[in-house]
């Protein structure tokens, strides 16, 4: 059985757009489960102003690749709703996948 992947997404929000971004994120977070996303967490950095991180799990590498493509583009009507609030736009949405290691 394949282990789920832990996904980290990170981006910086324009200071004057925090309220709009956070309002748009409600729909983004509600849409993620439609893509088999689980264990969603959303953070704002304590020591780096306006830096936000999303962490969640996806079941396969294919899920990760498809979701990463959608999130780093302006194609999806919900996911792209946050792009205007991100410093540098969709190209500044950083995304990484990690495989959990057993100890």
Image (cartoon, rainbow, N blue to C red):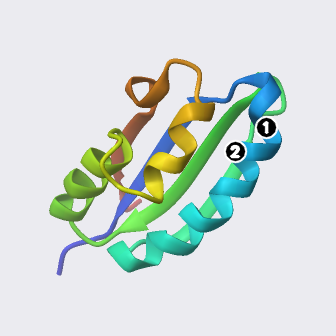
Tell me the SS state at disc 1.
helix
Along the line of sight, the residue nearer the viewer: 8 or 87: 87
**Could you tell me residue 94's position as x and y percent?**
43, 32
Residue that mark 1 sits on: 18
Q: Which quadrant holds the C terminus? A: bottom left
The answer to whether 38 is drawn above or below residue 87 in the figure is below
Q: Is residue 49 visible?
A: no
In the image, what residue occupies the spot 57% across and 74% down?
A: 30
In the image, what residue occupies the spot 79% across and 37% down?
A: 18
Tell me the SS state at disc 2.
helix
User: Local crowd at mark 1 within 10 Å, few (<14), some, or many (≥20)?
Assistant: some
**Could you tell me residue 54's position as x and y percent?**
57, 50
The answer to whether 73 is drawn above or below residue 25 in the figure is above
- Write down the quadrant of residue 53 in the picture: top right
**Could you tell me residue 5's position as x and y percent?**
33, 60
The answer to whether 42 is drawn above or below residue 49 in the figure is below
In the image, what residue occupies the spot 48% across and 26% down?
A: 89
The answer to whether the residues at label 2 and label 1 have Cβ atoms under 8 Å apart is yes
Residue that mark 2 sits on: 21
In the image, what residue occupies the spot 25% across and 46% down?
A: 69
**Could you tell me residue 66's position as x and y percent?**
21, 56
Q: Which quadrant holds the N terminus? A: bottom left
């Amino acid at each position: 059985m394949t282990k789920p992947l832990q996904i980290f997404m990170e981006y910086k929000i324009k200071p004057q757009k925090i309220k709009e971004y956070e309002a748009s994120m409600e729909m983004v977070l509600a849409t993620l489960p439609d893509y088999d996303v689980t264990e969603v967490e959303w953070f704002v950095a304590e020591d780096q102003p306006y830096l936000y991180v999303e962490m969640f799990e996806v079941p396969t590498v294919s899920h990760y690749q498809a979701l990463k493509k959608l999130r780093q583009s302006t194609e999806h009507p919900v996911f792209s709703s946050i792009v205007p609030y991100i410093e540098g736009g969709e190209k500044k949405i950083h995304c990484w996948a990690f495989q959990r290691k057993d100890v």
